[in-house]
Image (tube, grey):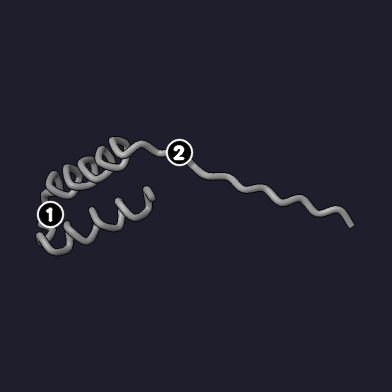
């Protein structure tokens, strides 16, 4: 049996993650109905940041 193992690491710049957070926050702020609570918006931005890592 032949087994192949590969390690791959995505290279993401810190500015790309910051841009993703800014985009998510702008999207949430742009929603008209319903308004997004500040705590919920902060949670979404945190999740976006973690997904970028």
Secondary structure under tag 2 reads loop
Mark 2–mark 1 CB contact (< 8 Å): no
Q: Nearer the viewer, residue 10 or 38?
A: 10
Q: Nearer the viewer, residue 46 or 27?
A: 46
Residue 43, percent across and down? Answer: 22, 61
Q: Nearer the viewer, mark 2 or mark 1?
A: 2
Residue at the image point whose x is 23% and y is 40% from the top: 23
Residue at the image point whose x is 37% and y is 53% from the top: 51
Secondary structure under tag 1 reads loop
Task: Give the side of residue 24 with respect to residue 12, left or right.
Answer: left
- Quarter-of-image position of residue 26: top left
Residue 37, percent across and down? Answer: 10, 62
Q: Please determine whether, in this image, residue 6 is positioned above or below residue 39.
A: above
Residue 14, percent across and down? Answer: 31, 39
Task: Give the side of residue 10 with respect to residue 47, left or right.
Answer: right
Residue 47, percent across and down? Answer: 30, 57
Residue ID for mark 1: 33
Q: Please determine whether, in this image, residue 40 is positioned above or below residue 51.
A: below
- View extreme (right): residue: 1
Residue at the image point whose x is 37% and y is 48% from the top: 52
Real-space Cα separation, disc 2 to disc 1, in angstroms:
36 Å
Q: Nearer the viewer, residue 51 or 41?
A: 51
Mark 2 neighbour class, 10 Å CA radius: few under 14, some 14 to 19, many 20 or more: few
Residue at the image point whose x is 89% and y is 57% from the top: 1
Q: Nearer the viewer, residue 23 or 12?
A: 12
Residue ID for mark 2: 11
Mark 1 neighbour class, 10 Å CA radius: few under 14, some 14 to 19, many 20 or more: few
- Quarter-of-image position of residue 16: top left
Q: Please determine whether, in this image, residue 17 is positioned above or below residue 37.
A: above
Q: Earlier in the sequence, mark 2 or mark 1?
A: 2
């Amino acid at each position: 049996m032949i087994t192949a193992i590969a390690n791959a690491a995505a290279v993401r710049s810190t500015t790309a993650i910051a841009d993703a957070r800014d985009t998510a926050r702008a999207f949430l702020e742009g929603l008209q109905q319903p308004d997004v609570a500040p705590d919920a918006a902060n949670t979404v931005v945190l999740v976006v940041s973690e997904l970028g890592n």
